[in-house]
Image (cartoon, grey):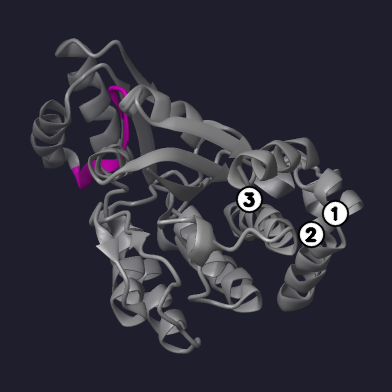
Amino acid sequence: MSIAFTFPGQGSQAVGMGKALAENFAEARAVFDEVDDALGEKLSSIIWEGPEETLTLTANAQPALMAVSIAVIRVLEAKGIWLKDKVSYVAGHSLGEYSALCAAGTFSLSDTARLLRIRGNAMQKAVPAGKGAMAAIIGLEHEDVEAICAEASEQGPVQIANDNGGGQLVISGSKDAVEAAAALASAKGAKRALMLPVSAPFHSALMEPAAEAMREALAQVTKNDPVVPLIANVRAAPVKSADEIAALLVEQVTGQVRWRETVQWFGENGVTTLYEIGAGKVLTGLARRINKDISGVAIGTPEDIDAALAALNA
């Protein structure tokens, strides 16, 4: 029996997230202060007061979600819960991989905030507005969606961006190709093929300029091996080397988030509980659909922390 900590990605953000943590725990407040200092602006004000459309901007949402996750981690540490003692693995969904690595000591908090600001800006700039798109395909198998993307690629690049499990796949690429793939998916029996309201085609080949920006940024920060292995998005397998992790983070910008396989790997390797650290409960819901034998627990509020401490100290 073992535990993994997972860290949410974009879409889990909500105005007001983490505020109760900062009000109740000095350790959490210090995280938001450090992120504000690292970015040279009061991101915490946007997190707690909005407006929502400003928080949702990729360059804000990414460091904001990371800040909430690390605020939870710092409170747990202050209460005597240390990753290397209690946790077997970490994993994060897309930007959440950076939160996981910050929690595991690979990057400092300030460097993580700056890396995510660079990542958000680079992803936004990689493709002109309106040229890219993403769509959720519900109810088809992975190989079916791969075949659909191959067929639609006559219209332009399109690929699977996220395999979230439970029959939910997200495709990404040029707008024409994604629309063609969504139409094909519907014709081939998908329950739903839904265009997503996103600002860029994340995790697609069109993100190559952003991948290059991250290669450069990651080369310039101090990196340590994580205190527990990371289950990497693009590999769905454990990684322990800081240099290898940096290379996979570059690959992740244009590669597939293999979340279904990540949760399956946990189940096959003795993980019985996944704690979702930070805002929302998206990953907890996905885990339930992928493997009913793994219990999921979200920790994002002071009340959640109290409950988690009782369980983790049992």
The amino acid type found where label 2 is placed reads Ala
Location of residue 262 with respect to 280 vertically, above or below: below
User: Of helix, strand and loop, which mostly describes the magenta segment?
Assistant: strand
Q: Which residue is mark 2?
A: 28
Q: Horizontal placement of 59 versus 177: left or right?
A: right
Nearer to the camera, 76 or 290: 76
In the rendered structure, are the residues bearing label 1 and label 3 in contact, judged by CB atoms less than 8 Å apart? no
The circle on residue 57 is 3
Give percent across and percent down for residue 27. 80, 64
Figure label count: 3
Give percent across and percent down for residue 264. 26, 38
Nearer to the camera, 261 or 55: 261
Task: Please give the range of residues in magenta.
Answer: 156-168
Which numbered disc, 1 or 3, marks the residue that appears first in the sequence?
Answer: 1
The residue that appears at 25% across and 46% down in the rendered structure is 269
Marks 1 and 2, how far apart at CA? 5 Å
The circle on residue 115 is none
